[in-house]
């Protein structure tokens, strides 16, 4: 998908993104204002005493890490929380304290953190520190009292040995300094002997100190894994953890906007309708003739002749663009007059409104236009132009009606109602003179100069089957190519609903204009409609993208230059 397509999606669903952003930010703001401030404090406890040893064993470190997980569980046991509640005289039972603190072991270490969350900023640090103290009081140890006393004695002996060693080194330094002076042989001999004696004493002191240190290390490691000590005490917090202010509101709004964008792009991904003009040529393999912007109320025919009522509107310009493209596409065609069949893939996509406004657009250009309502199942042209529908295309297909027209034409009588259903199956093909008389009696004139209409006529039980007859096709072909008109337009049924559109197009040699409603016609339906027409040899001029959302229009399909349009005053001609 191109960047422009993503931008169109963003513009189309901007309202949803803004709505969810406001919703997220609003919820965060309300929660922040209604929720009581909560404060947090943590104390950190070292499991074992390996950090105080100069060369702790690997096995000791591993044991301490494993024990940290055990102490994380022990910190939440009843003796610890009960001791904390009693020591601080807290205003809630011990079981309630479990809801206010959590334990966590720092990964790959023997450090345990106790984190307390409580609404009182002064009490929260006291609770955290007291929990750590109670855990230490309730922790076991492997050192006996004798071992503790022995460790103290060893520490004192080590201190004495270090002092003795330092004194010996100081005396040795003085003797070595005197040996550099000018001495008598007797004095030099005495000092050398004293120096040798001091070296022996120093070596012995070093050996003794090393032995004492090793003994102390062994005693200390015998129970050090279960020794707990506080590494960092909890401090009074300076601000509540849920008082982020506008930062939390902005973050919630951003989360809402991202969520809204995700929903929008998911909807677009699942939407398989034709939305933009750029989709039509690669999808259907036929050119896009025009894009018609929305106008009027869908489902109503009142005021839908926008090409006549509002000639300066963007929608009217879309029909003029359709007219121009059709005229230029017919330049190389030898057929006179050109015949266009307007259809759609499925019902209610705007084909009848398109046929009517296209006919008006041709008439406004000074061309004599005949519009035929060939949708015998759901005729609508008489509703659009507010015409009677007593006589129409269904009457044309009656043999008896044709004969009565010919008999009465000389007296200029009105066209009789065709009440006889007893037509024969034998085809009746009128000659050109009959056709001239027939056209004169059937067409309806309109307030629009040069535009005449043949409505569908009264519907009968067999009306929808008449189109397939040889007689019907011959008569329609004669009407469509009648020399009186410059352009003939047929409003045909939807392609995927019935087969009439293909039959009519082949019968009269018409070129098809397929109407596709933007955002409603599925891609698969549009493709099947085009394929079904091409399969029977029908020539397709192109596609009209109806009710095109202005925000979906690609560059070149924006008619904002023409404004919103002005209503034509009564009696005004086309500008």
Image: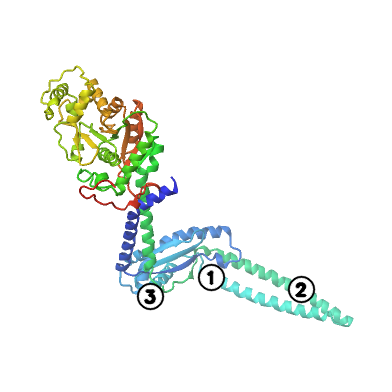
Q: Earlier in the sequence, mark 2 or mark 3?
A: 3
Q: Position of residue 290 (x, y in %)?
A: 35, 41
Circle 2 Cα neighbour tier, 10 Å, few/some/many (<14 / 14–19 / ≥20): some
Q: Nearer the viewer, residue 71 or 222?
A: 71
Return the x and y of residue 8 as percentages of the image width and height: 38, 50
The 10 Å Cα crowd at callout 3, few under 14, some 14 to 19, many 20 or more, is: some
Dot 1: what SS?
Answer: helix
Instruction: Measure how far apart labels 2 and 3 are at the Cα level.
Output: 61 Å
Q: Nearer the viewer, mark 1 or mark 2?
A: 2
Q: Pick the quarter of the image with the N terminus.
A: top left
- Give percent across and percent down for residue 197: 78, 75
The label on residue 122 is 3
Marks 2 and 3: which is nearer the front?
3
Q: Quadrant of residue 540?
A: top left
Could you classify mark 1 by the number of other residues whose Cα lies within 10 Å: few (under 14), some (14-19), or many (20 or more)?
A: few
**Residue occupying the far front of the picture:** 410
The local secondary structure at tag 3 comes to: loop
Could you tell me which residue is drawn at 57 percent across and 70 percent down?
A: 151
Horizontally, residue 127 falls left or right of residue 196, namely left
Disc 1 to disc 2, how far (Cα)? 34 Å
> What residue did someone put label 2 on?
199
* Comes first in the chain, label 1 or label 3: 3
Report the disc number at residue 148. Answer: 1
Q: Give how far apart the Cα atoms at labels 1 and 3 are.
A: 37 Å
């Amino acid at each position: 998908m191109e960047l422009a397509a993503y931008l169109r999606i963003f513009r189309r669903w901007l309202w949803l993104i803004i709505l969810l952003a406001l919703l997220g930010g609003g919820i965060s703001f309300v929660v922040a204002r209604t929720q009581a401030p909560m404060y947090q404090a943590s104390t950190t406890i070292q499991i074992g005493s390996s950090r105080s040893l100069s060369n702790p064993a690997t096995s000791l470190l591993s044991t301490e890490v494993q024990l940290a997980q055990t102490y994380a569980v022990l910190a939440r046991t009843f003796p610890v929380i009960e001791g904390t509640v009693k020591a601080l005289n807290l205003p809630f039972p011990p079981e309630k304290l479990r809801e206010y603190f959590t334990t966590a072991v720092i990964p790959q270490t023997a450090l345990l953190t106790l984190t307390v969350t409580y609404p009182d900023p002064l009490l929260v640090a006291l609770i955290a520190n007291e929990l750590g103290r109670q855990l230490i009081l309730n922790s076991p140890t492997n050192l006996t009292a004798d071992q503790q006393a022995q460790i103290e004695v060893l520490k004192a002996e080590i201190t004495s040995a270090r002092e003795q060693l330092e004194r010996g080194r100081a005396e040795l330094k003085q003797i070595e300094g005197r040996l550099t002076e000018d001495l008598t042989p007797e004095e030099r001999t005495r000092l050398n002997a004293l120096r040798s004696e001091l070296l022996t004493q120093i070596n012995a002191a070093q050996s003794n100190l090393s032995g004492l240190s090793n003994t102390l290390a062994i005693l200390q490691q015998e129970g050090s894994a279960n020794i707990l000590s506080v590494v960092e005490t909890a401090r009074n917090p300076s601000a509540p953890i849920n008082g982020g202010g506008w930062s939390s509101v902005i973050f919630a709004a951003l989360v809402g906007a991202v969520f809204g964008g995700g929903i929008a792009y998911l909807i677009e991904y699942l939407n398989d309708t034709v939305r933009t003009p750029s989709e039509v040529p690669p999808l259907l393999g036929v050119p896009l003739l025009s894009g018609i912007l929305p106008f009027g109320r869908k489902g109503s025919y009142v005021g839908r002749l926008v090409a006549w009522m509002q000639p300066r509107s963007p929608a009217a310009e879309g029909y003029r663009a359709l007219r121009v493209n059709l005229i230029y596409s017919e330049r190389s065609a030898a057929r006179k007059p050109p015949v266009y069949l307007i259809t759609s893939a499925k019902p209610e996509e705007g084909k009848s409104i398109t046929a009517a406004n296209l006919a008006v657009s041709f008439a406004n250009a000074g061309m004599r236009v005949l519009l035929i309502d060939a949708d015998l199942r759901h005729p609508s042209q008489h509703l659009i132009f507010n015409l009677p529908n007593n006589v129409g295309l269904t009457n044309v297909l009656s043999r008896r009606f044709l004969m009565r027209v010919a008999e009465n034409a000389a007296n200029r009588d009105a066209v009789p109602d065709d009440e006889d259903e007893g037509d024969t199956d034998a085809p009746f093909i009128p000659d050109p003179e009959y056709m001239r008389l027939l056209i004169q009696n059937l067409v309806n004139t309109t307030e629009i100069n040069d535009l005449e209409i043949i409505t569908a006529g009264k519907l009968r039980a067999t009306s929808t089957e008449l189109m397939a007859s040889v007689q019907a096709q011959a008569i329609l072909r004669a009407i469509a190519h009648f020399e009186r008109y410059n352009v003939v337009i047929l409003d045909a049924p939807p392609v995927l609903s019935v087969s009439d559109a293909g039959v009519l197009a082949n019968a009269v040699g018409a070129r098809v204009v397929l109407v596709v409603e933007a955002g409603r016609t599925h891609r698969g339906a549009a493709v099947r409609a085009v394929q079904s027409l091409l399969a029977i040899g029908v020539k397709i001029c192109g596609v009209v993208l109806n009710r095109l959302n202005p925000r979906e229009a690609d560059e070149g399909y924006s008619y904002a230059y023409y404004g919103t349009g002005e209503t034509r005053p009564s009696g005004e001609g086309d500008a």
